[in-house]
Amino acid sequence: MVMFLIRRLLASTMVVLVSTFIMYLLVDIALDPLESLRLSTDPNVEAQRAARVAMLNLETPVILRYFDWLGGVTGCLWGSCNLGVAWTTSQPVTGLLAGVVATTLQLVTAATFIGMFFGIAVGIISALRQYTGFDYSVTFMSFLFYSLPVFWVAVLLKQWGAIKFNNFLRNPDFPVWFYVLMVFTVSVVAMGMVGGDWITRVKVLGVSSLGTLGVLLYMDLTKWLIDPSMGIVVLALIAVGWAFLVTMLSTGLRDRRSLGGALTVAGVGVALYYPMFYVWVWLPVSWPLVIALGVLAVLVGLLIGRLWGGPDPWRTARTAALTAIPVSSLLFFERLFMTWETYTTHSLIRGRPIATFGRRTPNLEGSFWLETTDLFTHLLLPTITLVLIGYASYTRYTRASTLEVLNQDYIRTARAKGLTERTVVMRHAFRNALIPLASIAPVDVITILGGAVITERIFAWYGMGRMFLDHLAANDIAPVMAYILIAAIFAVVANFVADLCYSILDPRIRLNA
Amino acid sequence: MTFDTPRPGHEDVAENAIELKDVQGLSQGQIVWRRFRRHRGAIGGLLALLAVVGLAFTSIGFGPIPGWWQHTPSSRLDLINPMGRPTMALPTWLGGSGFAIGDAPFGQDEIGRDIFARTMRGVQTSVQVMVIIGLVSAVLGVLIGACAGFYRGWIDQGLMRLTDLIITFPLVVVGAVLGKIAGGGNVALLALFLGLLIWPGMARLVRGDFLSLREREFVDAARVAGASDWRIIRKHMIPNAMGVIIVNLTLVMSAAILLEAALSYLGFGVQTPNVSLGLMISQYQSAFSTRPWLFWWPGFFIIVLVLSINFIGDGLRDAFDPRQKKVPTARQMARAARKIEKGAPQ
């Protein structure tokens, strides 16, 4: 293992060195730092040219300049980073990087996980319902999303998702066609997902259309889009719903102890509804605190599960802990939703909450909740854009690997033993179907970082991709090389993580090979 | 609707009858074509692709050959409708004002250029880029993958390290740098450069296939018969890897269209006076609220091109995969069952 790590580290270092070397040469050919001086009519243009040549060392051969740059980069190993200076703005690149990396991560993280989550879920269901109308529609949709040019979708989203939606918010009454469309779509999709004989289908169709109608009526009548806070009753309903859903997927509803554990967690969440407001007031709220509270919730869930006991207490603990995640998020979002009205009526927002560009509303300052709401409204459109693309490829991968797994002998054995369909799918098929994804997901994260170049540009987020594009256009080599260096390191690390995950999940694969 | 279902106990026979008809006395090409034909999405994709490409190349002509459309992409006309609105109208039964094509069916931009002609030129650019990137990456990828897989040892090591290296480059990034070098003027040069970047995926797949193919008996037989390495690769191994190559090629080609559009949108790909669909979207996106037709058509054609190629690729994958057994429809089963009943020759 140690030998493998060392060998891998050496090989990766070589790859990074060679790729940055090649890219340095290419970028040097592509860029022309003297371009702005060529059209200049300034009388002392010669002096300026000489000064710039001296500043950028253009007289030195490019290979020597590369080693000069590399010398600065290797300084990072002992804490004295020098990635050069962006000469167009005379800012050191290290200072520039700190901000942009954070921005890009903020943009990409949520989108990656949401896309992965939905892609995997839909992919598995579509594999389970192979060759049905649902499967064909999902396949078509994922091909369609896969074929969409990002920049084209983004413009449409800005128009319909932001401008038109903000107009709509002034008087948010759902039109009749919207009711019809939503009820129809949701019920047909639900019917396709559940499948079964026609009696089941009709039942699912009826229940889901009534449910959708109820939710829409509630949202319409209470003007949910203007004041989205749920209140304790609705929150309790949703929490209990989550408890049932999580138990159904995790252990099956027949396991009464798990159901009890999950419902207890939901109950604790509801009981904390009012006390939490005091917590939010008395504690200095910040992201680390929110995350710590989330972890605490999971631990409490584990404890509750353990206390329910039973012959296999960890099953109950797992279910309860999994339920704690959505329940605690509900409490967080409830508090966030209570800020919504303050946010939309703020003098800088003026009732148009969904933003089309930028990372935050300039000059908007206020509580943690106000700023978080602001961040989320800015994240919404870019996230949808990134999710659409990531979702499509994950659906395809998951569908293919699930189909492969479902044809294996051990699935037939599991069915022959008389296990329930839930156990067969969640225990035997799902876990094995995820293995190939372990080698795809890390590489995909890198691709999203690359793809974020376009998304950042369109939504005016000043992240890494934007820094790269702007400086490439301005003939400024240092920030461009910094981006390429980081991208190369990410790629190498992603490949390494992919191999490692694969070998941990699939014991047939040896790393030493 | 009722179909006469096969009698109990006859399902297997009926299914086999369909299966047998698939393979009897046919070459691989014919089998693949038969399976491909049954894939509705793939046939739809093929027809859509042929229609779009045909329309683009005949309407405004290509190179010195004139087309049948009256305007050229760069000529400026007087505005036909106010604002340059599209003259194409839907038939009355679809809520339009009577079907018409008119002189500028997709509308005109703010300086009077015909959007139909410009979009068609953009489609031509996309198709050119797609073909060149496809060719370059196929030739390079197959050659490199074949050598690595066939010779193994240090050649394999060297070539695979090279592909690892190129895979680490984010495509949009290197594309932007290369696009800046190729300098907009020359679409073919840009496509050639991009083709030099996209081959590693193909090389990896071909290598994997070759590693298993070279252990097979027919390769030994060919070698015993005195065939040279080159002949074995060309005549015996590449035809066996054709499925992988073709399917991957469609993926590369659809990705190529999106890559070119993205680069042109960012300003590092095709540049004016050349026309590209990505470039058109970037030029016209700010006019979306006032002149939406400038924006809809280029995007629509990108989607049609990429979607149809993806569907063709999906159909080819199913057609080439020997394990893939399409579930016969109830109608097919019924037909096969009737044949058995009658005792008709299969």
Image (cartoon, coloured by chain):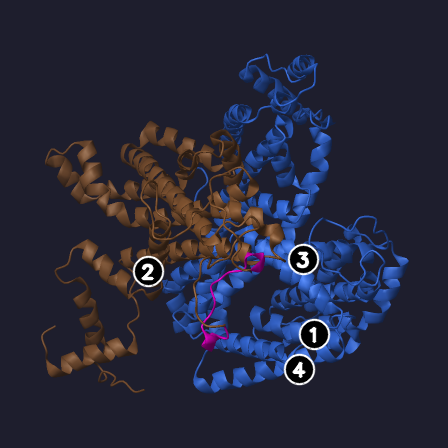
Label 1, on which residue? A238
Which quarter of the picture shows residue A84? Answer: top right
Relative to residue A513, is residue A80 depicted above or below? above
Question: In the rendered image, which quarter contains the C terminus of chain A?
Answer: top left
Which label belongs to residue A380? 3
Q: Secondary structure at mark 3?
A: helix
Relative to residue B68, is residue B337 depicted above or below? below
- Distance from Cα at disc 2 to Cα at disc 4: 44 Å
Give neighbour class at mark 3: few <14, some 14-19, many 20+ (Cα, 10 Å): some
Badge 3: chain ID: A
Q: Nearer the viewer, mark 1 or mark 3?
A: 3
Label 4, on which residue? A214
Badge 2: chain ID: B
The image position of residue B168, as x and y in percent, is 50, 36
Tell me which secondary structure the magenta stretch mostly adopts: loop
Specify whether disc 1 shares its chain with disc 3.
yes
Q: Earlier in the sequence, mark 4 or mark 3?
A: 4
Q: Which residues are magenta?
A: B82-96
